Image (cartoon, coloured by chain):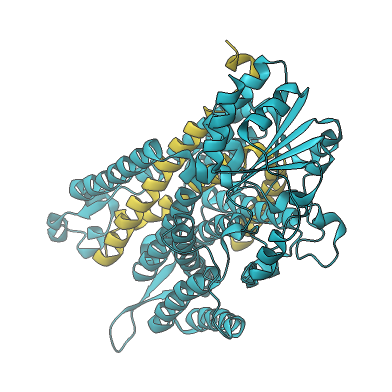
Chain colours: A cyan, B yellow
Amino acid sequence: MHEVAVNPWVAFAYLVAGVCFILALRGLSSPSTSQRGNRLGMIGMAIAVVTTLVTHVPVQTVGLVLDGPAGPIAATGPLFARIDTVAVLEILAAIAIGAAIGITTARRIAMTAMPQLVAAFHSLVGLAAVLVGFAAYLNPQAFGIGQLVVPLIGDPFTVIQPASKVEMGLGVAIGAITFSGSVIAFLKLNGNMGGKPILLPGRHAINLGTLVAILVLVAHFAHTQDGWAFWVLTVLAFAIGFLLIIPIGGADMPVVVSMLNSYSGWAAAAMGFTLGNSAMIITGALVGSSGAILSYIMCRAMNRSFISVIAGGFGAVAGPAGEAAATDRPWKRGSAEDAAFLMSQASQVVIVPGYGMAVAQAQHALREMADKLKEEGVRVKYAIHPVAGRMPGHMNVLLAEANVPYDEVFELEDINADFAQTDVAFVIGANDVTNPAAKTDKTSPIYGMPVLDVEKAGTVLFIKRSMGGVGYAGVDNELFYRDNTMMLLADAKKMVEEIVKALG
Amino acid sequence: MTFIAILSIFVLACFVGYYVVWSVTPALHTPLMAVTNAISSVIIVGALVAAAAAGSPTAKWLGLAAVVLASINIFGGFAVTARMLAMYKKKERVAK
């Protein structure tokens, strides 16, 4: 960035790209402007890519020049360079390969698999950051961060500016953490790896030690430019990404996915510093803040500190205590016909979806049920808890996929007051987020977590596979034993289909 | 650009990011993650610089590999966001 003379128009183009990205996120403030926002994002990316392609055309110096009167000096001059067609084609081929894979995946992916797709995409950004960092280390002059030194004795070598080395080191470290962390998150979300946290003894000491070692190595690398330090810090960063995510349980994944989102942004920002590129820096800052804010929203919705989520292990104690308690308290069981009758008589039904709805793929059947109820003159609303599902906004996307109009879907704060005027609350695949113990029982692990006040509704219909299991937090749900609760024990999708049938 | 100029852009962009992201409706948090993921692949700029440069064949191949990865993300990220956003409909349009 420092020696390379920057054409003001080039810098301006990158700035325009950065502004497009800001407007892309701004568009997401409402579904009606969101598609235009997404198109602006694409335009911004096109501007950034085309600008880079045009200003960094691969060139090869023509051998003939060496014989010219200007001698070897002219050999490096741009006048005598010609476009390296093979290199250009290689780059275009690389883009085409990526485009083909990306578009095919985006078209084929099921909406329920969105959390793992996002995790997979994060891992690619992380890995790309690591590769770019290493490329910058191997060819610093190309990035305008190195100076060739020709000593009197020995071989010439390139000195990279210390600030650039810090940026590269941090960029590569964050990229590597993003990569390995996202791979683990992907495996957990995709079901290739159990959702239960895996706890290593002394993991806090190991993690902290590794982090400190990475920072020390970055400092050492900046100071000495020792290649081994760069390699070792990369390996350690890969390891810590893995170690950080391993102990985090399935339902904490919304926080993890948001956090990795944030990291992929910081990695891009670090590389932006190395290149002095405003588009990369603006994007990095946007994505970094976005992920951080989403993590914060998710943590707040679980009433847990970010540190405790990252420290991991929540839900590891889920166990027999809850199950034993579940059997010896009286509860009511209902059938699909009972549920259909109750809902058809209601004036307002509020549906509370959770991760179980996604697992059972029950969103389409659910919308059918809502349509039938609407035909009978029942008002139907949906209530979404911020941490329902495996990523922020997961339930909203699934309902949108099932053609549920978004103005029937409400967030926790907007609908909680409504439950008192609701005849039937229909809980499908959610558990902890409806537990009234979070409001009353100070000994409960979920005490203080904001919950949906479903128990205030006239009747609560609660779909659950069986009475045995407990929610993710490992606590029994008070709601099951209330007088106004009717348990519908079955697979969520089957139960909803039966209710649809019973509604006629 | 001097370091302080770059740092200024970064810090101000963090503030812009903070306010813009808080204004995103929670219903669109999943598309937000998908689109931020697509735009963070602007790291392709670095990959293209490496892939286009002469001097180190290893750096060039690393750059090309990064171009592939970032392109997957750019095209995949924007396409999947567009697909999701097209599903969000208002009541009037659904009722025929």
Q: In the rendered view, tell whether residue A450 sits above or below residue A357.
A: below
Q: In the rendered view, tell whether residue A103 sits above or below residue A376.
A: below
Residue A393 position within the rendered picture, expressed as x and y whole percent measured from the top left? 62, 42
- Of residue A79 and residue B92, the one placed in the foreground of this image is B92
- Of residue A59 and residue A131, the one placed in the foreground of this image is A131
Task: Residue at 35%, 56% (x, y): give it.
Answer: B66
* Quarter of the image where the C terminus of chain B is located: top right
Give the quadrant of residue A429: top right
Task: Residue at 56%, 56% (x, y): give it.
Answer: A257
Whether residue A453 sits left or right of residue B84 in the image: it is right
Residue A7 position within the rendered picture, expressed as x and y whole percent measured from the top left? 47, 46
Q: Would residue A82 be seen by someone viewing this image from the given angle? A: yes
Task: Residue at 76%, 32% (x, y): give it.
Answer: A424
Give the quadrant of residue A163: bottom right
Whether residue A349 sits left or right of residue A77 in the image: it is right
Give the quadrant of residue B30: top right
Q: In the rendered view, tell whether residue B46 sits above or below residue B25.
A: below
Q: Would residue A37 be seen by someone viewing this image from the given angle? A: no
Residue A176 position within the rendered picture, expressed as x and y whole percent measured from the top left? 46, 67
